Amino acid sequence: MSMETYLNFSQDNLWGELWPELSLCLGALLVLGFDLFSKSSNAKKRAGSLAIFFQFILLAAHLFDYLLLRHTFDRESFSGMLKHGIHQDVMRSFFLLSSLLVSLLGHRYLETRKLRVGEFHHLTMIATAGLMLLCQTQHFLVFFVALETVALCFYPLVAFDRESPKSLEAGIKYLIFGALSSALLLFGIVLLYGVGSNPEAWGTTLSTVPSSDAFSFSFLYQLLSENPNHLLLRAGVVLIISGIAFKVGAAPFQIWVPDVYHGAPMPITAFLAVSSKSAGFFVLINLVNGPFAGMSEFLLPLLGFVATFTIFFGNLAACSQRNLKRMLGLSGVAHAGYLLVAVMASMLLPGESDRAVWILFFYLFTYLLASFAVFGVMGLARVTDDSEHEFSDYENLAQKKPWAAFVLVVGIGSLAGIPPFAGFIGKLLLFSVAFETKLFLSIVAMVIGVVISIYYYFGWIREICFHPRPVFEDDEAKHDPWKDVGSVGMLKPALFSLVLASIVLGLWQGPIGDAF
Amino acid sequence: MLSVTPQHFLILSFLLVGIGFLGLLIRRNVLLMLMSLELMLNGINVALLTFSRVGSNLDGGIFVFFIMTVAAAEVAVGLALLVALYKKRNSVLSDDMGLLKN
């Protein structure tokens, strides 16, 4: 091989396209180093501020970069292994925003609970870099490595409170289930590769031999659309989809969700609920619109069953929960079911950038706003055991801390999908696109699911706003988690801007509405 | 004379994955569950190498290195968590876990 061949390869590697991920990793190392070399605990606290400041600047720079500087979409780099388009850029900003909010929530949480600062922000930032890379990949090798980078950061984060056996137990459970799902996913990839690397031996046909290798999405697209009935290929696709279903917590792979949400520290629960799930859905929609597009006949009934099952399971199981973190986890399972309907609609609509994809983005964004508002307020409460938030801890919050109650009620309302909050618009758009693609059974399931969800969401609102239990004079004094919340600092304006965004997006979608 | 064909390697790999999966389901010791996970990943590696050899392309062989690295990292994290849990609870049996209940 001559030198020119290598030159082409190296010129194909556009490292500049990856600058947000690279600078995020660099920032993560910076935060870790800062934490390592600062002596006093006061200086260590500044590592958290550094992380927040860094991520804020990065988010602003990234938004500026892709909104104003470089409009040329759909660029490919690293010999087609990565793709940078408008979807990918939207998701990158989404993950950066989510990571910034996790750091903000974590900053105060770590301080009140005397946990290590540097490692927390470091792992959060690395996980975010992995998530950003994950949504750009067009090749199963990068896909696997990015997925594992994320997973390996999440395991220690879930078990971050090493003094609490609950947190550790949740970490172990997440690790076992996460590793099992990766193994299943990997097995699926291997089956696809096995057939793709030697098509004739497995009785498949390929009209033209593509230049890309058997792990790349473009090759698999061709292979799968020419042989949609091949048994091994189908098995591979089902295994990959079940691996992703594990990550998003779709039934029947949802068993880990309540336990892990229950034990994980509050900011990490929010991180899991928002970033991890969104990444799973973006990857799923990328796969079913990309390499698996040829198999949609086979996948649609499968996903339809999974979506319906997920909606019913999540909502019914959430009704019986007394622990709020478990309830939120199971309601997150139900949300995953609704989002699966958007994925199905996107399979039925032509093209990769159809309405359903944008509705999925909008829904995820409203979910981010609402979830961080809810988890942010929950993180403020000084419950004796952080894993055990019960309904009664929120009794009469509207009188004790009116602003916190307001944020919480807007967050819950948006999650439940009642007007005038953004969650309502998200659900409405989801219904309309499901109607357009004639997914009537899924609509029925969604309507029933939403009605059930009103029960547990409004039970919580009732607890917050009204005083359901009479207080007798001879009652024992209960521990009040809202007595010494302490200074809230930066978190208060951040929570209020989330709530404001939730309300504004519920009333007026502006230029975003044009995409629907 | 019997010769070892790629099919034999594939059967071996499927067996390894199956044993690992079963071990994960029926073992009560988390340490053994981690070992079962390793077994699954190694079974996948065997399948990848067989496919790579049969299809005479190197991509599968390269993938194996990544899987090995990731598996090592996963076990490192898993053992660290397990040691921390053992210090708290003096047990690595999954029956003794059960703090996370409604």
Image: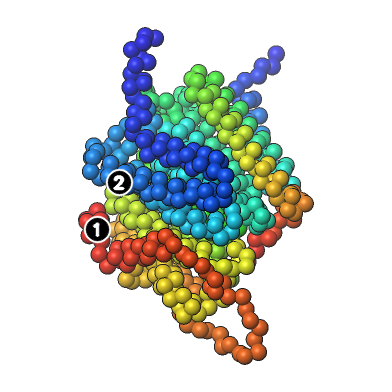
Three-letter code, disc 1: Gly
Determine whether A334 is above or below A211 in the image. Answer: below
Q: Position of residue A106 (x, y in %)?
A: 50, 55
Quadrant occupied by the N terminus of chain A: top left
Quadrant of the image occupied by residue A513: bottom left
Residue closer to the observer: A461 or A108:
A108
Q: Residues within 10 Å of mark 1 (few under 14, many from 20)?
A: few
Return the residue at label 1. A513
User: Which is closer to the viewer, label 1 or label 2?
Assistant: 2
- Can you tell which mark lies on residue A26? none
Which residue occupies 34% across, 28% down?
A: A14
Mark 2 highlights which residue? Answer: A63
The answer to whether tags 1 and 2 share a subunit is: yes
The kind of secondary structure element at disc 1 is: helix
Quick check: A153 left or right of A225? right
Q: Earlier in the sequence, mark 1 or mark 2?
A: 2
